[in-house]
Image (cartoon, rainbow, N blue to C red):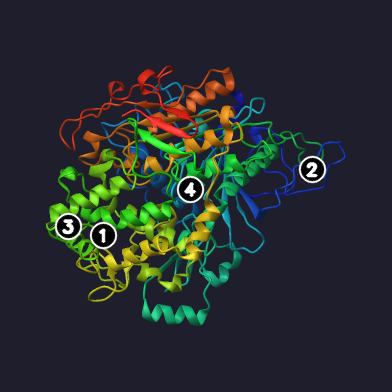
Amino acid sequence: MKRLARFSRLQKRPQTVALGALALLAAAALTACHGGDDDNGGGQPTNTLPSFISGSVNTQTYDGVSDDLLTAGLGKTGLASATAPTIAKPAAPTAAELRRLAIYSNYRALVDMSSNGGYGRFWGPNIDVNGNDSLGEGKIAGKEYIAYADDGSGTQNVSLLVQIPASFNPDQPCIVTATSSGSRGIYGAISAAGEWGLKRGCAVAYTDKGSGNGAHELSTNLVTMIDGTLSNADLAGTKAIFKANVSASALSTFNSTFPNRYAYKHAHSQQNPEKDWGKNTLQAIQFAYWALNDMFGPVSGSPHQVRYNKGNITTIAASVSNGGGASLAAAEQDTDGWITAVVVGEPQINLNLPSQVSVRQGGVTVGSFGRPLADYMTLANLLQPCAALAPAAAGAPYLTTLLPATTNAIRTARCATLAANGLVSGGTTVDQATDALNRLHQAGYETDSDTLHAPMWDSQAVPAVAVTYADAYMKASVLDNLCNFSFGTTNAATGAAGVTPLVSPMPTIFGNGNGVPPTNGINLVYNAGTTGAADHRLATPDASYAGAACLRALWANGNPTMVDSVNAIRVNANLRGKPAIIVQGRADALVPINHASRPYLGANRVAEGSNSQLSLYEITNGQHFDAFLSVAGFDTRFIPVHYYNIQALNLMWNHLKNNAPLPPSQVVRTVARGGTAGSAPALTTSNLPPIATDPGANAITVAGGIVSVPN
């Protein structure tokens, strides 16, 4: 407590790592070591920066009062506020303001913040590791280290961040990874994994995995830096998070033809960054080891000596969605013992699927399983607008920003175009929509997600991912306008593209953006619209069908670049005997469970046999976006998967620390809240049964790669 009290009185200040430091946490504002000899005369190796770190390491100490690691000084109350943190000069935010905005936005993007949901009662800064409301505003004092990982070219610039809380016990060290979800920036898993790790007193190792929120505003040549501030791309040089690889003359020509467009790192880096997500997660862990040695390593001269060698620190690879997939990939690649265990939610993962693997539900083999994202996402992007009109999808909650009068007209037109091209059958719109939905079922989408196809497409989650990943897999330049899609500002009323924004999105893109447009005023544009380039939903009567069909054809027709890139990201499900938990909602309509967790479980059993320590917890009434639970219709139908992610992390902690057995794979049968859409009754534990020690008839079994899931 004395150490924490001393720490809280420290004044926060930015620093660049320099030689010499005190090892005590109370003196954490001073930072040590930028490399050194193999030993410093004391017979112990010195703490040398990993070779992949590029440039300087910057640090910041937070007092836990005015600012902190978890809430950026906002506390539980500030994070819950619907009003975002203010910026003194909106055109020129400071790095501290952008960090606060990024933490606020990313925290809220991944968990349910609604008043009748679980925030502040089941999770949130105020909730302790035992589930009690005991932490007040929940601010956490500590220190951050941030740097780029790069190959020396300055074109990768993967952001790495380590948070070390004041409560860290150097005698019982632990690390939790928080690889960014989606294509989010460096704080993109702060509520999904970072919060739990910080409350446990663990260091948290973050990475944006090289697909983070790096934007290049082509009309002004502005780019984002590691702290979110802006620079001219030419002046930034190799220090930008990302800048498009285009010549000045090519850029000038492009801007004249396609004004007010944006390049994005995930889509346009031309590096297929997904192939390195596992490596980036391992790099974040190694950077965390260095930071912990920098803070707690023995001092005998300068720099510090090494206290922790690989494998000395209990390390849980954790995150959700893409971050979860990256954690699984890291565990598979980890031959050196950096990772102790794995706990992930709804992982987006692409498999080398063994022939022995199949998935059965209720004794019946599912329509399809184990497809890569490039396959199922481009198919969903084609069919979902039409499938939304099927009677089985009636009453779906919508997240649309389309003009209300156009929504069903667009869906009807998409159905007609699909029918004209032989992709659905039926003489009426209802018949065509029903067939579209059935084709999604045949492609591995659960009936549990029928009412989610409309919001997944209307919210643009599926179209945005389909375009971004196609660009990434094709290693496309922003100049290519792959399948006639680009990212740009549009007219709010008509959807027309190329408009100069009244307020540039760039100053706040680091704080508000998610790395995949539409985001922060930058939209998905179809350049071959009926009357010119426009928002893809409004560009043609059938919502840019030709562009969606083009994306689908890249995979369906076996484009060699597409196939090679997808093959480069496939994993083998060999976790090398590490204890592991996967949590996923059965109703997931973004990353269908039949293409992710279920076949991964089967492939893992084929790869590891009796050495497998993987459990899958499948959550009924669970879908991909807990943040949507505040939307009318989501609140009544679906429960928070995050609740079970926390429970899984606690189960794994108890397993690692107390040798408690992990519950076997199972279906957890939750109870939807029901009630009136938009005012569902408060979430209670009666909606959320625990993961069972003995699941009985709800057990998920695996035999010879065959995964059997009860209905």
Q: Which residue in the structure is indicated by mark 3?
A: 407
Residue 152 on image: x %, y %: 67, 61
Q: Earlier in the sequence, mark 4 or mark 3?
A: 4
Using the image, determine if residue 499 lies above or below residue 342.
below
Q: Residue at x 54, y 17 (%)?
A: 660
The CA span between labels 3 and 1 is 21 Å
Q: CA distance from mark 4 to mark 3?
A: 33 Å
Disc 3 is placed on an element classified as helix
Q: Going 29% across and 33% down the picture, which residue do you hit? A: 621
**CA gap, disc 2 to disc 4?**
45 Å
Quadrant of residue 108 within the rendered picture: top left
- Nearer to the camera, 43 or 574: 574
Mark linked to residue 350: 4
How packed mark 3 is, by other alpha carbons closer than 10 Å (few <14, some 14-19, many 20 or more), is: some
The image quadrant that residue 381 belongs to is bottom left
- 1 vs 4, front mark: 1
Q: Are marks 2 and 3 in contact (CB under 8 Å)?
A: no
Q: Residues within 10 Å of mark 2 (few under 14, many from 20)?
A: many
What residue is shown with label 2?
302
Q: Amino acid at mark 3?
A: Thr
List x then y, in percent, for residue 413. 17, 63
The residues tagged by marks 2 and 3 sit, at their Cα atoms, a distance apart of 65 Å
Helix, strand or loop status at disc 1: loop
Q: Where does residue 438 sit, x and y in percent of width and height? A: 24, 47
**For the residue labelled by badge 2, is the local secondary structure a helix, a strand or a loop?**
loop
Q: Residue 202: give x, y in percent of width and height.
A: 57, 32
Task: Please name the residue that numbered disc 1 is placed on.
Answer: 423
Ranked by sequence position, the earlier of labels 2 and 3 is: 2
Tell whether 603 sits left or right of 21.
left
Tell me, yes or no, if residue 239 can be seen here.
yes
Image position of 430 with respect to 701: above or below: below
Q: Is residue 87 visible?
A: no
